[in-house]
Amino acid sequence: MPELPDLVIIEERLVPELIGRKISAIEIVDPIVVRNLTGSSIEDGFVGASFRGLYRNGPFLNFDLGDKNVVIHPMLAGRFSLEPNYKKKDLCVRFRMEGSVLNYSDDVRMGKVYFSLPGQFAQIPKYSEQGVDLISEQFTEEEFQRRIDKSRQQTRVFLMDQSKLSVLGNAYSDEILFEARIHPKTPCHRLTSEDKHRLYESIRRVLADSIDYIRRKKAPLDFKVRDHVKVRNRKNEPCPNCGTKIRRANVLGHDSFFCPVCQPMAGEQFIDWNRLQP
């Protein structure tokens, strides 16, 4: 999915293109991704409205139209573009404005586009259940410690729990754990105070550095920038720190990439990565 750094940059780039523009037409190319919560037709309720604001709530982008909202949850494969002649088969919804367009595309149709009123956000799954925003002033080390101290989850599972931390996906969970030198399957209650401090600092640093990198990259809006990652999807490549092969493990149904030397797990493991032949 577009992860938090991606969404921050998407928000930054869409705001100057959309704010103040009036919607002249909405094309529903594939209705499977659309959820209309308003009880009236989308055309009657949203055509003619102007974009007044755009803000992120975890993995959601909320387009403020005054007395109504369009909330988009891109999930795994959702993408945005401003190309007026975008004709790819993954196009799902197009918003037309005078002199501009906003396209939402999704080749697996997993994301959702919610047309709603301001009082209906609770009807959007997980929208009102987000944990602390990881790039907000509320994400202090004290708040992080309070949340992780209550958890007995594996550390990677905790990082990806949107009800606690908003919000990390697969890629940046792997990068943060690598930066913090913590094995993804380490239970939270086995982390030392130093481990937790290092993990908090890693979250702040990896997200800030990634946002800055993607911003400077200036890639097309619908392009997912990942050439800066150190372990994600780099199985069998050398660890940038020690040269050991990056490994992949399953953590609660998700692939996780890590270095078995830089991120050792205390205690007995089903697989001893260090004994495997290179």
Image (cartoon, helix red, strand yellow):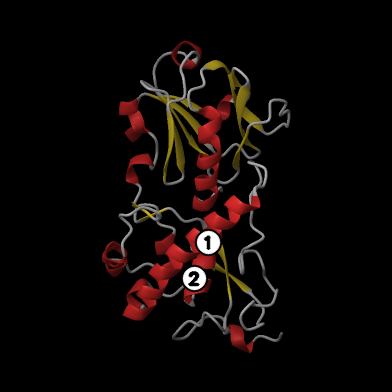
Say which mark, if any, is on residue 209: 1
- Residue drawn at the location 46% of the way across and 24% of the way down: 51
Q: Where, by quadrant of the figure, is residue 204 drawn?
A: bottom left
- Residue drawn at the location 48% of the way across and 23% of the way down: 20
Mark 1: amino acid: Asp
Q: Residue 210: where, in percent of width, then height?
A: 55, 58
Q: Number of numbered discs present?
A: 2
Mark 2: amino acid: Leu
Relative to 110, is 243 above or below?
Answer: below
- Residue drawn at the location 69% of the way across and 77% of the way down: 238
Q: Residue furthest bottom?
A: 275
Q: Is residue 48 left or right of residue 120?
A: right
Relative to 224, is 38 above or below?
Answer: above
Residue indicated by mark 2: 177
Mark 2, secondary structure of its residue: helix
Q: Nearer the viewer, mark 1 or mark 2?
A: 1
Q: Is residue 200 left or right of residue 239?
A: left
| Closest to the observer, 209 or 75 | 209
Relative to 235, is 275 above or below?
Answer: below
Give whichever of discs 1 and 2 has the lower sequence position: 2
Q: Residue 180: where, in percent of width, then height?
A: 47, 74
- Residue drawn at the location 49% of the way across and 70% of the way down: 177
| Closest to the observer, 171 or 81 | 81
Q: Residues within 10 Å of mark 1 (few under 14, many from 20)?
A: few
Q: Is residue 36 left or right of residue 6?
A: left
Q: Is residue 228 visible?
A: yes
Q: CA distance from mark 1 to mark 2?
A: 15 Å
